[in-house]
Image: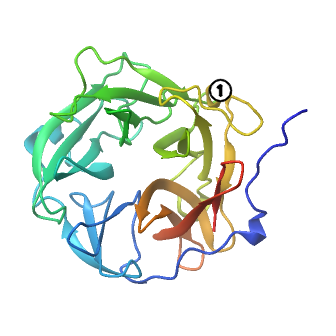
């Protein structure tokens, strides 16, 4: 029997993001609940912009992760601006991965810092994790780290043939020796336009979430979030019709609707037994300002993610 495609809710039925107050402005958010209570969100902007919340609803500007850019960042751009951070917790520490690059080039690098508390101003930078150059067919930006079967993996990528993944050394948090670059998702034609991966485990599957199409143009942005799944962390990832994400597949999870334009730059975090999708959208009722979207992520009986 042929598989029926799993599609996102009709645009008019997408639930709005959780109502939030305080500092809503954000881009490429990564969110976690801290071990000592409360929440922190890091994002593109500043020297990795920080937001803090006691309840996940009211957010306050908390400055930056770093007081100033580490010197090595300037090898990749003139301003030392980092992009698209990813926060995780393991081995008694918080780990913050991030990218440094310039628009339109794959002369890029991913770095890592650690902190005992996860709070802004407490991070120690440990330098470069992995990099790409103009002779590579991938772009080392938009990192996202996941553990699987006792091993540590980092997905990454933007355009330049799409989403890739490497294994990390569990002790250093950097690329494992002779790490193979695995290809997870792409589009059939240039510029490929798939980026910002996040991988999570649910049941017996690994789920790859990615942003498709174009960001960073306010209300003209066309970002949307798609997903596929695999039984092996290395893939192949397929959508509900069986189409591989390496052949342009991917089930639509969330697209622009109403005032919420260009939904993407997503990450997934778990809080009190529930999964949450964090993302940015461009507010059509506020001159296209990028703002924080938070929606509960639920799962259908046949194991596909759904916004709720």
Q: Which quadrant would the N terminus be assigned to in this image?
A: top right
Looking at the picture, does residue 66 appear above or below residue 20? above
State which quadrant residue 230 falls in.
top right
Tell me which residue sits at (29%, 51%) in the image.
88
Pinpoint residue 152: horizontal percent, then vertical percent: 31, 34
Helix, strand or loop status at disc 1: loop
Pinpoint residue 279: horizontal percent, then vertical percent: 48, 61
Pinpoint residue 124: horizontal percent, then vertical percent: 8, 50
Q: Which residue position holds label 1?
A: 189
Q: Which quadrant would the C terminus be assigned to in this image?
A: bottom right
Looking at the picture, does residue 308 appear above or below residue 135? below
Q: Nearer the viewer, residue 105 or 92?
A: 92
Pinpoint residue 118: horizontal percent, then vertical percent: 19, 61
Tell me which residue sits at (20%, 58%) in the image.
47
* Label tally: 1
Residue found at the very far right of the displayed protein: 1
Tell me which residue sits at (41%, 56%) in the image.
28
State which quadrant residue 2 falls in.
top right
């Amino acid at each position: 029997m042929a598989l029926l495609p799993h599609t996102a809710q009709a645009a008019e039925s997408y639930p709005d993001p959780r109502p939030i107050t305080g500092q809503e402005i954000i881009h490429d958010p990564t969110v976690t609940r801290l071990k000592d209570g409360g929440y922190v969100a890091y994002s593109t902007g500043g020297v990795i912009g920080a937001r803090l919340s006691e309840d996940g609803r009211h957010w306050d500007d908390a400055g930056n992760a770093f007081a100033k850019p580490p010197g090595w960042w300037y090898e990749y751009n003139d301003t030392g601006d980092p992009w698209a951070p990813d926060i995780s917790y393991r081995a008694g520490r918080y780990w913050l991965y991030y990218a440094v690059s310039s628009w339109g080039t794959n002369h890029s690098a991913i770095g890592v810092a650690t902190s005992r508390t996860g709070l802004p101003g407490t991070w120690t930078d440990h330098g470069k994790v992995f990099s790409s150059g103009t002779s590579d067919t991938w772009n080392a930006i938009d990192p996202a780290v996941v553990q699987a079967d006792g091993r540590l993996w980092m997905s990454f990528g933007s355009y330049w043939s799409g989403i890739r993944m490497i294994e990390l050394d569990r002790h250093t948090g950097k690329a494992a020796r002779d790490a193979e670059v695995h290809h997870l998702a792409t589009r059939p034609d240039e510029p490929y336009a798939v980026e910002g991966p996040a991988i999570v485990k649910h049941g017996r599957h690994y789920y790859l979430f990615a942003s498709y199409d174009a960001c960073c143009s306010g209300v003209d942005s066309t970002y949307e979030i798609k997903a596929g799944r695999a039984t092996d962390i290395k893939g192949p990832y397929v959508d509900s019709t069986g189409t591989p994400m390496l052949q342009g597949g991917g089930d639509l999870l969330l697209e622009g609707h109403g005032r919420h334009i260009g939904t993407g730059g997503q990450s997934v975090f778990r809080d009190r037994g529930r999964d949450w999708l964090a993302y940015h959208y461009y507010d059509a009722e506020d001159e296209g300002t990028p703002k924080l979207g938070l929606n509960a992520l639920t799962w259908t009986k046949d194991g596909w993610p759904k916004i709720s």
